[in-house]
Amino acid sequence: MTMKVTGIQVFWIIMCMDLGMTLVMTLSPSLEAAKQDAWLSIIVAGLIALLVALLATRAAHLYPGQTLIEYSETILGAWLGKAVVITYLVQWYTIIPIVLSQFTDLVQIMLLQGTPREAVALLMVLLIVYATYAGGIEGIGRCSEFLGPVILIMISFVLIASLNHIHWKNIMPVYADSGMAGIWGGTLAPASYLGHSVEYLMFAFFINQPRKGAPFAFGAVITAVLFVLMTTVMTIMTSGVNLSSKAWYPFFEMTKRISLFGFIDNLDAIPVVIWIASVFVKLAIYLFITSYGTAQFLKVSNWRTMVWFIAPVIFVFSLFPQNVTEATAHYLLNYWVPVALPVNMIGLPLLLLIVGKIKQGKQAAPAQLE
Amino acid sequence: MMTKALKLCKSLILLVILGLTTSCWDRKEMDDLAMVMASGLDMTDDGQLEVTLQIALPTGIPSAVQAGGKKPSSVMVISAKGKNASEATSRLQQQLSRMIYFGQRGVIVVGEQYARHGLDRVLDTFTRLPESRYNSYFVTAYGTTAKEILNASYQLELIPSIGLNKILASNVSFPVKIDEFLNTLSMQGKSPITPAVRIVHKGSSKETFMVDRAAAYRANKLAGFMTPEELRLLRWWTGESKRMRFSVQAEPADEQFAGIIGAELLNSSSKIHISMKNGLPEVSISLLASTRSIDNDSRIDLSKISNMDYVEALMSKQVQADFEKMLSHTQKELKSDILGIGEEVHIEHPYAWKKIKKDWFDIYPSVPVTVKAHIKIERTGKTKAPAHLKTSG
């Protein structure tokens, strides 16, 4: 049985993965490093994310009939190929529990202080297991096709409703306070979150017209970056950098500030919708590619059986981080930014692309001689 | 066989999801909550923090049918002391059968004594508590304690703090919300300011509160209060000048006319410009406004251009002088940068600011400021000279 997703579904999948988490998780480190110039950081981060998307789509299109697990061996040979695959599996296996515990942290901090973490995490695990097991990537694609526009509408609403709180001077002075170093420091966290389009390496295989997926991936990254950029500017102008850089979730704080016509306020529910929808899509996609990838890697014929092993593991691991700092800050600053961003998102796709091109060139050359 | 097990499994998952999504651990029933409408903070003489809460009593709020009968009190005001906010709040909680809930708090009052001592121990809780809102107004009590303010009666609203909230929300005063206050407090080049509330007609049946002053802070300490006249100029400065009126003595008074012309602001704006001299800022401020004259108790005929120019110049001069007076009060006496001149230096001359920002509070009182006011009369109302003016002779 083959699962297929359409180009527009790829657009929504990548957009959901990029947008929601970046908005909620990376604004705070970015504002802390770059202060009122965080929006410049987002622009730089957006360029990095586009580079990641470029490398991922180019590399994935070398062998459109294969998944990452297969073509990395085709390109780099059995051993090196396996090493590359393991690097990615490490990324996938660690990101799922972290995202899950970030999700439970936020729910606990902002909404349900009395609810045990296990209950919140279990609910999400059951949901993604159901989506992955029953729907596969096709089901997830359809879900994101529906949830993606909802996310965009909600964010637009928050941005428009915050317009009456704007203080232009909050964004001044531009550049002088943070300088190059500050802006670069604020770039890495959002860049590493916007770089999730690297997962295109894995699911390019499932696109019904594999070679036509690239524009959708680029469109998704650009849309996500634009929305993150607008939200960052609005957060700075409505909340000011001093307060928002000290909050865990500046985007939530901005929506708490909304007050329209004196009677529409307390709109905390909106970012929760954005957050849960994007976490759901992201986790479901990761669960799918992890299950599928592991199954292919271990030569298990039915990838669905892997879900039953992976789900309990990620659930247990998600309970390990003891507090919000461990899950949100440590993983981001010790693995995701220094390792995943340069190696998994830029280095390895580049390696696959270069070696793959050379290999294809060599194969094509004798053919031309005949 | 397989399908049966799978079906069982699926329905189990569904049941678990259904059970979990209700999230019963965090249920908050309306009749288990004590809705805090306003909270007050004071410092006792022995240095403890006293927290006062005004809590809405649902049973005290009469329905339409009951209205008019004997009124039960619609709020309950309780206070407790402690060494910080959470200690005092937990003492309050011990007196209450319902859980204290800050989600609806509209006003936060600080007593004058506590403000002068310096606002510490509590500020963090306003942003840290998840249910705490940024939409609460922040006011300083003038010449009294927060406890007195929250105990004061107010007749127009069932819940007094809602009355205070509405006064603050209307544009006749100077609204400052808690997040603005904290944001300003975290800036190096700006001092926080809040409206100041006081009780008038104390002890009589006409007892009510009034917001006609502003409290200027230096860092987290109250530096002093601004007079009602200064408050009006501050509103002009922040652009909240709607319906603001002022009058000018245009002629010496005689037996028929007092010689005063009054005007109401239609549009106003203010500009600030900083130039650096020897690494130190020089400030020029300009105030622009168009007005309409609303009363003319003088012999001046406002339809004549020359008279108009004369009155405009007179008004400009007066506003200029008033603003300068306010500035010297805040700058020299209170030493509180409520206009945010430092922040303006930060924006216009960011690199020079880096050098002086550490010492800004020492530099600020001696920064030269020039003020220019430019006021235009745009409309004169339906009459030219006063209609009852006797024609000469």
Image (cartoon, grey):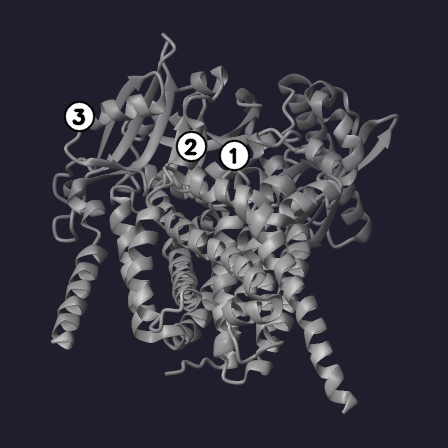
Which quadrant of the rendered structure holds the C terminus of chain A? bottom right
Residue B143 lies, in percent from the top left, at 44, 19
Q: Residue at x 39, y 55 (%)?
A: A267
Q: Which mark is residue B181?
A: 1
Please name whichever residue, B376 or B42, is drawn nearer the observer in this view of the structure.
B42
Q: Quadrant of residue B320?
A: top right
Q: How many numbered marks does the figure carry?
A: 3
Please indicate, yes or no, whether residue B244 appears anywhere in the rendered image. Answer: no
**Amino acid of disc 3:** Gln
Closer to the chain start, of discs 2 and 1, is 1
Where is mark 3, residue-wise? Answer: B95
Question: Element under label 3?
Answer: loop
Please indicate, yes or no, whether residue A68 appears anywhere in the rendered image. Answer: yes
Nearer the camera: disc 2 or disc 1: 1
Q: Marks 3 and 2: in contact by CB < 8 Å? A: no
Mark 1 to mark 3 CA distance (whole Å): 31 Å
Q: Chain of mark 1?
A: B
Vertical position of residue B157 compared to residue A210: above or below: above
Where is mark 2, residue-wise? Answer: B210
**Amino acid of disc 2:** Met
